[in-house]
């Protein structure tokens, strides 16, 4: 009987905490969702950091005046 009383008290304590924990998780879920939406929209960029769209790739072996691939000679039988 004493074990039953202890168990019931403990269950009441746990059930009393559930409302507070539900609120906390709802706030946490909303914050995470907002962060993901900002990331998708691109509105939450750190200062001084560029995006991948700002980057320019340069091939060091291509002469400046020719498009890539046109400066190479084809090998084959004549």
Image: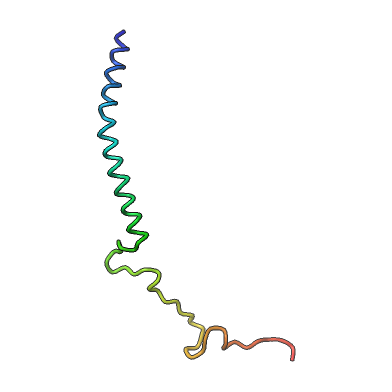
Position of residue 43 measured from the top left corner of the image (x, y, whole percent): 30, 63
Q: Quadrant of residue 47?
A: bottom left
- Residue that protrudes farthest toward the right in the picture: 77
Q: Name the image colouring.
A: rainbow
At a point 30% along the width and 17% down the height, the residue shown is 8
Question: Looking at the picture, does residue 27 appear above or below residue 8?
Answer: below
Pick whichever, 51 or 42, lies toward us: 42
Position of residue 63 measured from the top left corner of the image (x, y, whole percent): 50, 88
At a point 31% along the width and 53% down the height, the residue shown is 34
At a point 35% along the width and 54% down the height, the residue shown is 36
Pick whichever, 43 or 64, lies toward us: 43
Q: Quadrant of residue 42?
A: bottom left
Q: Quadrant of residue 74?
A: bottom right
Q: Is residue 65 left or right of residue 10?
A: right
Q: Is residue 24 left or right of residue 36?
A: left
Quadrant into which the N terminus falls: top left
Quadrant into which the C terminus falls: bottom right
């Amino acid at each position: 009987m004493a074990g039953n009383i202890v168990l019931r008290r403990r269950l009441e304590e746990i059930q009393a905490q559930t409302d507070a924990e539900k609120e906390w998780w709802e706030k946490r879920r909303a914050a995470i969702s907002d962060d993901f939406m900002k990331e998708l929209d691109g509105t939450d960029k750190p200062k001084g950091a560029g995006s991948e769209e700002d980057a320019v790739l340069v091939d060091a072996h291509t002469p400046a005046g020719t498009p890539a691939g046109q400066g190479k000679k084809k090998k084959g039988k004549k």
